[in-house]
Image: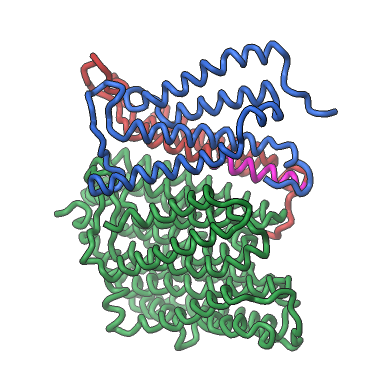
Chain colours: A blue, B red, C green
Amino acid sequence: MKQQAGMTIIVKTVTRLMVWIMLVYGMYLILHGHLTPGGGFGGGVILALAFLCIFLAYGRTYTEEWLNIKLLHQAESAAILLFLVVGLLGVTAGGVFLTNFLYHGELFSLVSAGTIPILNILIGVKVGVSLFLAVWVLSDPHLLEEGGDM
Amino acid sequence: MTVYLLCFVLFLVGLYGVLTKRDLIKIILSLTIMAYSANLFLILFAYRTDALYPILSKGVQPGQMVDPLPQAMVLTSIVIELGTTALLVALVVRIYQKYKTFDITKIRRLSG
Amino acid sequence: MILPYFIVVPLLASFAISLASGKKDTWAVWISLPAAIVLTVLSVFAFFGMEATETVYSMSGWAAPYGIVLVMDALAAFMLVMVSVISLTSLLFSIQYIRNLSMDWKYYALFMLLVAGMNGVIITGDLFNLFVFMEVALLSAVALVAYGGRAEEFEASFKYAVMGAVSSTLILIGIGVTYSAASTLTMSRIYDVFAVGNTEVMYWAGGLFLAGFGLKAAAMPFHAWLPDAHSSAPAPISSMLSGVLIKALGVYTLIRIFFNVLGAPEVFMKAFLLLGGISIIVGVLLAIAQWDMKRLLAYHSISQIGYILLGMGLATPLGMLGAVYHLLNHAMFKSLLFYNAGAVEMALGTRNLKRMGNLRKVLPVTSGTSMVASLSIAGIPPFNGFFSKLIIIIAAIQAGEPVYALLAVIGSLLTLASFMKVQSYGFRGKRIVEEIQQKVGWGMNSAMIAVAVLCLVSSLLVLPEIREVTLDPVVDVILGNTEYIQLVLGR
């Protein structure tokens, strides 16, 4: 039997409503990484879980249409490259790698702490995308056949 | 002292699993248990009686806090364990693809 | 100021490769080769221009007790030169070899990540940062061992990953124990705390570190993963693993932690001696029975690591000189031997010594360089292996350990015997091989010739004038703790 396209209508509906809340919560964690617990990794994991909910509820084909997998692969590499570029900008601005060269701002305000929120966003993208892609690649049904490649 | 001993027991449970289990997935789970016990050790080292969480927030006077550095280390080590586990699972998927089994006693093409 | 680039350059190269490459490996080769050349130039510059450059680098401007520092001393620079030279020749060798397996950029991305991890382990001055970089190197090494995609490779890779995870857990607990006693992770500050007593905690931490890093260095009771992993990997990766990875992750960390951080406690020196002695004999005995060429070489790695541990365990200046010198020599000749094995495997399609023959006609470069490498590892003068083994043996006798000196001599003789076997069956056999499946190209040949020349050149290091500027500073850093401490803490 062919793999069914996703789960029942109940699951699909609930997922459709919940995914946006999860995405917003993940972004909240990433953007407030320099103020509260959380940050790039935690927020990124929640972003990845949101995408994985879609994947589980709607099935592989639908997700493939909804998301551009190739673009995600590139976003993953680009995020870490940008992280290094920010680090190298620190060398030009302050003399050392990863210098916090932006305006530090007021304590406890959202726009503060210099480059740290930027780095948090980049880490969030990297973690979210790569966690999703790890599950995506590993759940490829072709893998269990002889000669299947990742 | 008891908590440290219990933590060590958890470590031994993981080690026992790694050494004796035949199923590849169970070996991975045992490795995860071992890693958790290491994380727990670090958190226990950082613990101080009657201390606050080490987060500076608005309106809260900084008092005695637990040591934040081991907590940061644990976060990093969790990330590393995520990577290790993903890699191990990928390897197990490929091993299953080649050998059609998860039983480690049947996966013996290499001598020694 | 060049310190962070040892990590940044390979990382940039790795992720630029994964971003830029399509299906083919053109981009990957053209990004990774320049990166490796840049690293080699930087490391040679760092080694010889040490006084001219800054030696302690605080990441993101936070000084030693609060932030992570990178430290460049003679030992680190020495290891960096070794890693970059071997990785450059490995990359040269890889181009044709990996195209033969598959046209893939993933290999090069992982390779650069491996180099980044090793460089990070070598130059960091922070205990936990060392752990993180070690995991980076380990994970990419595990993925590279499985790169060929055959069943045995996945099996070996799984074993390697499990062993790596167990040892990493031990090391993490060791770091926790150290931190709980010292309240700092900067390695030089930990020395300060342990120097004023606190021996009980030091033994706990030292035992955990010995088990963890001993597993990574594949000393004898912890060796089980090495022959599988090193013989299953693609040949250039075998040479990276045997040549530099077990040294950067195992031996270097043991030296740094036990000599510079824990202050060379007596008990662990005895343990090094014992591990080294057992490794020398058992490794070579297991090696001599093998017919698979790469497996034989992998068992020899265990035996040669034994020599290094023996030299370390003596803890005299002469013994340490021998250990450091043998570290370099082993990196050279073992990578060369693995290149030879890879070239033969590609040309004949076999690694079995019985099915090889006289290869002088069809593979002149390979058989010629394999002669150099075999003579070096067996310790025949004037090749480099002779001098370093001689130094270790003399040091053992001077230190009043004649038993270990005898073990080292026996190990050396057995090594000679097993490489006579390799030569007489593999490269100078009776059956003259006329045709080969695939030609060995200029990239592979030039890599082999370059390392063979280095094997000969590095035997010059024994001359006192050259030794003074190359090996002696390294030994001074290892045995003279104060220098390293002063460097980091600035007093």
From the top left corner, tell me how far across and down residue B103 is, in percent.
Answer: 73, 43
Image point (23%, 14%), residue name: B59
From the top left corner, tell me how far across and down residue A135 is, in percent.
Answer: 62, 34
- Which sits in the foreground, C100 or C376? C100
Please state if A138 lies on the left or on the right of C335 as rendered: right
- Which sits in the foreground, C336 or C205? C336
Residue C314 occupies quadrant: bottom left
Please state if C109 lies on the left or on the right of C195 as rendered: right
- Which sits in the foreground, C82 or A45? A45
Q: Quadrant of the C terminus of chain C?
A: bottom left
Magenta stretch holds residue C257: no
Please state if C210 lies on the left or on the right of B94 as rendered: left
Image point (70%, 76%), residue name: C353
Q: Quadrant of the N terminus of chain C?
A: bottom left
Please state if B56 lies on the left or on the right of C134 as rendered: left
What secondary structure characterizes most of the magenta part?
helix
Magenta-drawn segment: B84-99
Residue C467 occupies quadrant: bottom left
Q: How many numbered discs, if any?
A: 0
Where C232 falls versus C177 (above or below)? below
